[in-house]
Amino acid sequence: MSDDNEDLGMWDEAMDEQAAAEAEADQAQPVELDELEEDSPITGEEKRKLDAILDIPVTISMEVGRSNISIRNLLQLNQGSVVELDRVAGEALDVMVNGTLIAHGEVVVVNDKFGIRLTDVISQIERIKKLK
């Protein structure tokens, strides 16, 4: 019987903690942020900070298209299978860096290797607006 009382006491404590967290969340106030300026000059301190991160590696990927299929259909794929994508033939590819769209492009062949010619680069302001 005492185990039941302890369980109920722990349950009550957890509910009280959740109620307190929800009350605290309700008290949150929106913060006004300054608008980013596209042509603001970079100070020497900002340039030094930027130089510190320029050699950090990132993952860049080119996305031809996407498709949602069931695991059953995925397991049935084999050599020669065709998966229909959500893009029309000839439509621009998405160029993603760490999962964030930064540009659109088209496939090119240079010296027997595939490459991407960027046709439309997403501005920094537009990328930040998409995060909101």
Image: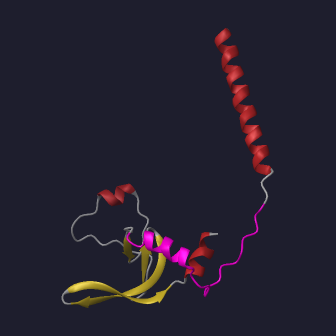
Which is more toward the observer, 103 or 83? 103
**Along the horizontal axis of the image, is 33 left or right of 103?**
right
Residue shown at 71%/74% (left/top)? 34
Residue shown at 56%/77% (left/top)? 127
Q: Position of residue 16 (x, y in %)?
A: 75, 32
54 in magenta:
yes
Q: Quadrant of the N terminus?
A: top right
1 in magenta:
no
Can residue 77 be seen by looking at this rendering?
A: yes
Q: Position of residue 90 (x, y in %)?
A: 39, 89
Residue shown at 26%/84% (left/top)? 114
Residue shown at 45%/68% (left/top)? 99
**Along the horizontal axis of the image, is 82 left or right of 102?**
left
Q: Position of residue 94 (x, y in %)?
A: 43, 79
**Predominant secondary structure, magenta span:** loop
Q: Which residues are magenta?
A: 30-55
Which residue in the rendered view is the most extreme toward the top? 1
Q: Position of residue 10 (x, y in %)?
A: 68, 23
Q: How is the image coloured?
A: secondary structure
